[in-house]
Amino acid sequence: MIKLKIVHKGLIYLCLPLVAQGYFAYQLFDLIKQVEKSVEKQAIHIRMSREMSFTIIQFCRTLSAIGTNARFGGTKGLMSAAEYRKLMDDHLARLDKDIKITSTDYQQVYSQSRKLIDSQYNLLQLIQRGGEESTLDTLNRLALTKNVISNAEAAGMVIYTAWGSEEELLAKEREHEAESREKIKSLIWFASIFDLTLALALIATFITNITKRINLLVKNATVLPSSKELPYTVKGGDEIAYLDNAMHKASRELQEAAGYRRSLIEMMAHDLRSPLMAIGIAFDAMLKSSTSGLVSVPDSKISYLRQSLKHITTLMEDLLALDRMEATQLELELDLVNAKKLVEDCCELLNAQAEQKSLTIKTKIDSLDVIVDRNRIVQVLSNLISNAIRYSPAHATILVSVSRRQNLAHFSVSDQGPGIDLDLQDHIFEKYYQVKNSPKATNGIGYGLGLAISKQIITRHGGEIGVDSTLAKGSEFWFDIPLDNADDDD
């Protein structure tokens, strides 16, 4: 099967109208040629008619001059026989030039005209011969005159018949010419409309085909970063199909790489979990020994080590969670949940952490039900409230609110922290991204995964997450969850 590139397809689409135009041009030139032939035939017929008229006129003039000289004697006004011969030979030559492409009637005209001219020439020679006219000359003159008259009668009938035929031929040629002209006009109109329609149809087909295939390519390109299997295949052998094949190959390689990454992370998590648990047990034992006086280890160091261990464990769990979400392996356990109860439970979990910095957590909650995965939304709220606690100054207030906005449940967590620069707000939901502008952040280090995980969870719920922040005035992190068919508890 021949594989055509885009340029080849374009040339084919371009050549088709040109071929059609060439065909119509051929037909047009053929009609023009027919018209030219018709005009040429008319010109020949006109010339033949003129030559026939010349024959008759010259015959009448010569006969009149002969009659006048026969009555009054002499040769006054007569054309010399040699001059007459030359004049009429030129006339016959003109007839002979066109006689071959005309009707048989004209051939008879030529034959009779020659006989008439010859008889007139002989009569003129006899009249113009010098010397005294004898009885024999008179008899010859009468015989020649009779011959001239006889030839004239025969020529007259032939010329009359030829003229009649010629009028019919001229009428047919004019009719044929008119038909050809009408055909030319019709052909020009038809060719113009046909070429325009064909060109537009081919252009539309070409653009539609290219656009459709490029749209499939764009849709594949949007799926490519997610390491999923590409949903569409662009067929063909041109550059677009080649690019699509390359994207499918890259997608397969990305899927393999994602599989290797997940395997590596799972292997690391598995290998790290047991040692970390052992270290945690050892810390608990050290803490008990320190409390009972058996081991002299400062409590602050043990707490620091436990906190570091907690951060390492959290990092490992976050990496696993984010990887599962990106691999579309996160399954939501949806249920009808009361928003007020959900927020209160989440705040209760974090009150102790807030009290360490003398922070106050306030709530403002509309009573409504949402269909969500409770544990996942608690994870999001906990992350947002923990960040607010981390970046808020001592004795500040954190406000957690829930309200209904049309068909959305609007959750928000507002703090009185340092705020986030406008240029950085678009990046804080990216993996491993951290805001570096707050020296007051306490309570350990962040890894830039919490907000990325929160975004994945809210997106899986069909919602949207964002932040509104002003430097030195604090931040408000929010997310919206569709209410769907959940009932409000009014």
Image (tube, rainbow, N blue to C red):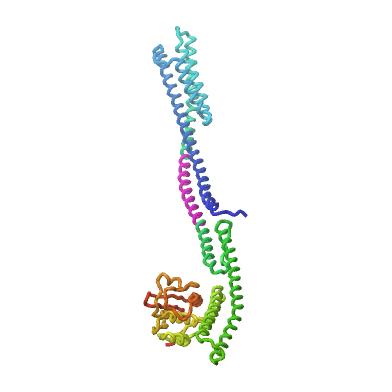
- What is the chief secondary structure element of the magenta stretch? helix
Nearest the viewer among 286 and 352 is 286
Res 265 → quadrant: bottom right
Up/down of 62 relative to 204, above or below: above
As rendered, which of 140 and 112 lies closer to the eye? 112
Give the magenta part as a residue range: 176-205
| Residue 361 seen in the current view | no
Out of 361 and 135, give the one closest to the viewer. Answer: 361
In the displayed orientation, state which residue is furthest to the left. Answer: 473
Image quadrant for the C terminus? bottom left
- Is 168 on the left-hand or right-hand side of 324? left
> On the rendered structure, is 151 left or right of 237?
left
Magenta stretch holds residue 200: yes
Q: Residue at x 46, y 46 (%)?
A: 188
- Indicate whether residue 246 is drawn in magenta: no
x, y (%) of residue 450?
49, 77
Name the foreground residue: 349 vs 235: 349
> Is residue 215 positioned above or below 401 on the image?
above
Q: What count of labels does the image hold?
A: 0
Quadrant where the image shows the N terminus: bottom right
Q: Residue at x 42, y 72 (%)?
A: 425
Task: List the single residue furthest toward the top.
Answer: 132
From the top left corner, tell me how far across and down residue 459 is, in percent: 49, 75
> Hey, which residue is sitting farthest bottom in the picture?
292
Outermost residue toward the right? 1
Q: Where does the image place residue 14, in percent across and percent down from the top left?
A: 51, 50
Q: Position of residue 256 (x, y in %)?
A: 60, 68
From what the image shows, is residue 51 above or below residue 146?
below
* Residue 235 makes an appearance in the image: yes
